[in-house]
Image: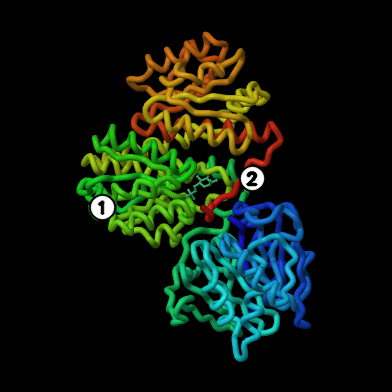
Amino acid sequence: MCGIFGYIGKRKNAGALVIKGLKNLEYRGYDSWGVAMRLSDGSIKCEKDVGKIGAVNPDQFKEESSLAIAHSRWATHGGVTKINAHPHFSCDQTIAVIHNGIIENYGEIRDELKAKGHTFRSETDTEVIPHLIEEELKKKGTTLEEATRRACIRFTGRYAILVLDARSQTLVAARTGSPLIIGVGEGGEYFIASDIPAFLEYTRTVQYLDDGEMVAVHDGKIRFSDIASSAERTKRLVTIDWTVSEAEKGEYEHYMLKEIMDQKDSIRRAVHQDDEEILAVAKSIENCIGCILTACGTAGKVCMAADYFFSVVAKRHVNFTPASEFPIFHHFLRPESLIIVVSQSGETADVLEAMKVAKAAGSKVLAIVNTQGSSIARAADYTLLINAGPEKAVASTKAATGQMAVLLLVAHAVAGKLHEGRTLLLETSGQINDMLNPRYIDHIRDVAKKIASHDNMYIIGKGWNYPMAMESAIKIQEVSYIHAEGFAAGELKHGPIALIEKGTPCIALMGNDEFTADMVSNIMELRARGAQIIGIGPKKFDVFDHWIKVPDSGAAQAIVNIIPVQILAYLLAVIRGRDPDMPRNLAKSVTVK
Ligand code: G6P
C-alpha cells in the first residue's frame, strides 16, 4: 500500500530518479502521486496530481537536485484529490513527508497543533507528521532525527515515513509496521524505498529497517537507531539476487502476462529447495500439536489447496484460517502449535498480526514467502523462499503456483516421499513449459471472446480443485470486474444453482481423478439449466461446450489447472478494456489491516 521512494547522495538528478524508480512500485497504489525535491537554492519543488505515476514524464524534473522523495498513494484518510496527495509539508514549507500506513491518533494531534497555530491543508492523517516535526524542531538544539523520533513516539498505528528537510539536507526514515528498505549505493548515496524494485537499477546491496527503528542520512553518513530508546543500531549488508530484467515487462504488454508465462520456469525454481531444510520443516509439522495455515487473498486460497495436499499426500490434518480471522482462534494456540503463513510480499499486515498472536502464545511460525528479507520472512522461526522473482502485477499468478509447489513438496516430505514430490513437480514444470505456447493462448482467447460480455461467471471444482475454483473467481473478479464465484461442485444444488440462466459461463476444473463421475453429474445439472460449460482438465467430455486442455499432473493438478484460468482472466480484462496490472481499488502488498 502506497509506494515510497527517496534518494540522497551525489547525483544531480534526484527528482527524475525518484519518479522513475517509483514507477516500479506503482503496484502498491495508484490513486495519486507526488514528488518533493530540494533545489540548489535550498527551496523545495513539489509536484503532485491525481492519477497514475506511470503517465508522468521523469524528464520534467530536470532541475539539479541531490535529495528527493516521491510517493504513489492508495488512499485511506481523505479522498483521491491533488491536495490529499503526498508529500505533505510543514507550515514553513521546509519539511516534506511521505507516508504509508495510518496514524490512528492523528485527530487529537491535529487539534493540538491547530491550537498552536499550524495550518492544515489536506484531510489526511499524514499531514500531522511534518507539522509535529516542525513543532519539535522549535526546541533548541533539536536535530531532524531527534524531532522525527519524538514525533514517532507520539504516533499510534502502523506506518513507514520518509522525511526530507531542505534546510539541513537530511533524509530521515522510520517504520512501525510498514516496510522500508535502504539501498546502499556508491560513495555515500542511499535509496530508501518501500520495495526493492524502486532502486534495483542502481544497487542490489540493501539494509532492512525493522519495526521500531529509524535511519537518518546526512552528508554521506547513515545512522540507524531505535525509535524508543535512540540507541544506535548496526545493520547487516544483504545482497539481493533479483535482477533488473526480472522486474521489467520486457517483450510483454503487461506484467500479468509476463508473470503467467514465467511459470514455464518458476515452478522449477520453487522446487529448488535445500533438502535438509525441507526435512527439518517436515519434522516440525510431524511433531507439532496443531498446525494452522494462514494467509490473505490468493495466498489464502493456496493454503486451502494445501489443506488437501497435507490430507491426501501426508494424511495429516492441517487447517486454514484467513489471517484477518486468525486472532479470534488464539485460545487454541500453544507452544507446541505450528503456524504456516504464506505470503508473496512478506509484508501483509493481517499476516504479520496473525504471527504476533501466534508468537504471543509461544507457537512456532513457518513462513513461505517470495520476498527475501521481508518482515514476515525475518519474523518467522523457519522460512522457505519460493524464488518466483519479483511479482509486480496486482493479481498474483506465479507466486501462487510457486507457493503451491513448495507446500506440495513439504506435504510429500511429511509423507516421507520428498524425492517423489520433487520428481512430480519437476515433471509438472516441464508440462507447463510445453503448455504455455502462443497457440494455447490463442485458443483461450477464442473462449474468452465468447464469454467476455457476460456479467456473471461461476467456477466449480472438487478436492483441491475446489480452492482453485475460489482462486479462479478472485482472478476473474480482480482484473476483469466480472462477477465470478467459485464453489465446491457438490454445493451448487444447495443454492447457487438458482443463479444459472441460459448461457451463463460456468468453468469446471477437473483432474484425472476419482471425482470425475461426480463432476460430470454436477456439470449436467448446470447444463440442464442452460449453462455454457468451459471444461478445464486433462480429458474432454461431451458435457463441455469449450475445452481447455491441461496436462494430467496427478497431485500437482491444482497447479496446472489454475494457469489457463489466469490466462482467461487476463484476456477477459484486455477484451473488456481493463488494465490487468492495476485493477481499480486494489493494491499489492496490503500493509494496512
Ligand atoms: C493483495 C493482493 C493479492 C494477494 C494478497 C495477499 O490482496 O492483491 O494478490 O494474494 O494481497 O498478499 P501476500 O503478499 O501476503 O501474498
Q: What residue type is labelled 1?
A: Arg
Residue 112 horizontal/vertical position (percent): 64, 72
As drawn, 406 above or below 91: above
- Mark number for residue 334? 1
Q: Is residue 425 left or right of residue 155?
A: left
Residue on which the image places disc 2: 585
Q: How far apart are marks 2 and 1 (CA)?
A: 38 Å
The label nearer to you, 2 versus 1, is 1
Element marked by disc 2 = loop
Residue 118 placed where, x, y %?
72, 74
The quadrant where residue 576 appears: top right
Q: Residue at x 60, y 91 (%)?
A: 141
Dividing the image into 4 quarters, which one contains the N terminus? bottom right
Q: Can residue 252 be seen in this view?
A: no
Residue toward you, 481 or 189: 481
Disc 2 residue crowd, few under 14, some 14–19, many 20+, Cα 10 Å: few
Q: Residue furthest top?
A: 528
Asked where in the image residue 196 lies, by quadrant, the reply is bottom right
Residue shown at 59% from the left, 38% from the top: 478
Q: Residue at 22%, 47% (x, y): give it.
A: 289
Q: What residue type is labelled 2?
A: Asn
| Vertical placement of residue 345 versus 443, above or below | below
Q: x, y percentage for residue 89?
A: 71, 71
